[in-house]
Amino acid sequence: MGHGVPGSSALVGTLELGPIQGRKRADGVTLAEAMRAVGLEPEHFREARRKRSEFAGYLELHIEQGRCWKIWDWLLGLLSGSLGPCG
């Protein structure tokens, strides 16, 4: 939906829903609708922010759900690093 790491961004206080709020998935579902469908309230996303002092560490796991698995006929994929947007 136009943002690679919304959960992490909300956690550190850098997420702004304005620019991505109106974007839709291929099936027409908006970000707000998708959030509500899993029990989240998009209007309260700022409450996810945490202070740096509250962290001993942070790990964000992702599962590749793209069609690459099928195309490459892979059963398992492992990463030793990751690259994401910053700034």
Image (cartoon, rainbow, N blue to C red):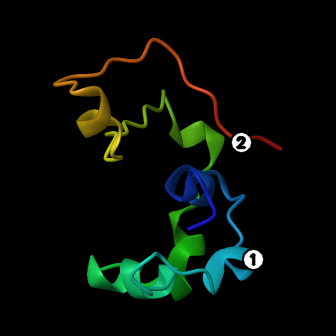
Residue 69 x, y percent position in the rendering: 27, 35
| Quarter occupied by the C terminus | top right
* Mark 1 nearby-residue class (10 Å; few <14, some 14–19, many ≥20): few
Q: Nearer the viewer, residue 76 or 46?
A: 76
Residue at 68% over, 59% down? 13
| Quarter occupied by the N terminus | bottom right
In terms of sequence position, does the residue under pointer 1 or pointer 2 come before the other?
A: 1
SS for tag 2? loop
Kindly check if marks 1 and 2 are in contact, taking CB atoms under 8 A apart as contact.
no
When asked about the image quadrant of residue 11, the answer is bottom right
Residue 54 x, y percent position in the rendering: 53, 42
Q: Amino acid at mark 2?
A: Pro
Q: CA distance from mark 1 to mark 2?
A: 15 Å
Residue 28 x, y percent position in the rendering: 45, 87
Q: Is residue 69 above or below residue 87?
A: above
> Is residue 40 something that shows in the picture?
yes
Q: Nearer the viewer, residue 64 or 37?
A: 64
Q: Is residue 72 above or below residue 35?
A: above
Residue under circle 2?
A: 85
Q: Is residue 45 above or below residue 73?
A: below
Residue under circle 1?
A: 19
In the image, farthest residue toward the top = 80
Residue at 34% over, 40% down? 64
Q: Is residue 30 above or below residue 19?
A: below
Residue at 50% over, 56% down? 7
In the image, farthest residue toward the right = 87
